[in-house]
Image (tube, grey):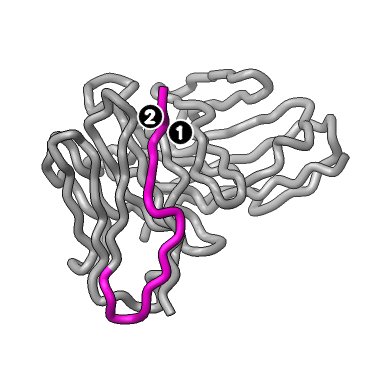
């Protein structure tokens, strides 16, 4: 079974540009989560999508947005990039159904975004 | 953003030794998860805990959901070189709507 996949692996942008990151969840998973991990730090929750809808978002400005497609893949968009947006962006998926399984998030390898 | 207090921040141990790390919070949590992250990769789920007092093992790893629901512990027995990495705890507070909160991480280095 394929795991969570993310693209691109690396992305280099300049300040003020927009970045688009993509994620494909594990087959059968309907929930997708996005996290930001700055160098040497822990994971900060960004967004949660389930069944095509945004269910929750972390304490990030509106220029961080995204969407989930009918096939449950997801896209994270970061507008007006700032230097401090440089980080590893991780996508995770879970079953989206009730019970313990719902809480078990499985992560992709991440997209390393560098803003210069 | 909010983070869990995880300790120790880093540790060097000899191969074959046992390792203990913990995660604490001022809030009550419904669920605790433990992950391991290797450099340049995403975190890998090790153990999930759902009930206060629960003790769960995965090979040489054992994790416990604290009775107070404000802490969790991870033990690694007979460490080996491939245990090197960063271990994160993650939890879902009772007050949140599935907003996972991650610990600051414990960096483990194993000396052969």
The x and y percentages for residue A46 are 29, 54
Residue A52 shown left or right of residue B81 in the figure: left
Q: Label 2: few (<14), some or many (≥20) within 10 Å?
A: many
Q: Position of residue A92 (x, y in %)?
A: 36, 40
Task: State the image quarter where residue B111 is shown.
Answer: top right
Specify the quadrant of the image occupied by residue A61: bottom left
Q: Residue at x 41, y 28 (%)?
A: A2
Evaluate if marks 1 and 2 touch, with contact meaning CB atoms under 8 Å apart. Answer: yes
SS state under label 1: strand
Instruction: Read off the residue under disc 1.
Output: B33
Q: Which residues are magenta?
A: A1-18
Q: Is residue A8 magenta?
A: yes
The foreground one among A12 and B77 is A12
Q: Which mark is residue A104?
A: 2
Establish if A99 lies above or below A106.
above
Which residue lies at the image location 60% right of the left edge and 32% below the top edge?
Answer: B74
User: Which chain does the numbered disc 1 sit on?
Assistant: B
**Residues at marks 1 and 2, CA–CA distance in whole angstroms:** 8 Å
How many discs mark residues in the rendered view?
Answer: 2
User: Can you say which quadrant of the picture contains the C terminus of chain A?
Assistant: bottom left
């Amino acid at each position: 079974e394929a795991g969570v996949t993310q693209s691109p692996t690396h992305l280099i942008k300049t300040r003020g540009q927009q970045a688009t990151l993509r994620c494909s969840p594990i087959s059968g998973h309907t929930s997708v989560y996005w996290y930001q991990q700055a160098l040497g730090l822990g994971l900060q929750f960004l967004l949660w999508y389930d069944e095509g809808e945004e269910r929750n978002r972390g304490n990030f400005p509106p220029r961080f947005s995204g969407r989930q497609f009918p096939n449950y893949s997801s896209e994270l968009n970061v507008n007006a990039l700032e230097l401090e947006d440089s980080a590893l962006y991780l996508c995770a998926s879970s079953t989206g159904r009730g019970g313990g399984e719902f809480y078990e998030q499985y992560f992709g390898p991440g997209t390393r975004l560098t803003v210069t | 953003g909010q983070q869990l207090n995880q300790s120790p921040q880093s540790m060097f141990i000899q191969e074959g030794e046992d390792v203990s790390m913990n995660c604490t919070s001022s809030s009550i949590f419904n669920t605790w998860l433990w992950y391991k992250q290797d450099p340049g990769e995403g975190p890998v789920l090790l153990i999930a805990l759902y009930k206060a007092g629960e003790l769960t093992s995965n090979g040489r790893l054992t994790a416990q959901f604290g009775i107070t629901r404000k802490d969790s512990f991870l033990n690694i027995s007979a460490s080996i070189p491939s245990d090197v990495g960063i271990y994160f705890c993650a939890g879902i507070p009772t007050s949140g709507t599935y907003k996972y909160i991650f610990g600051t991480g414990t960096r483990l280095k194993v000396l052969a």
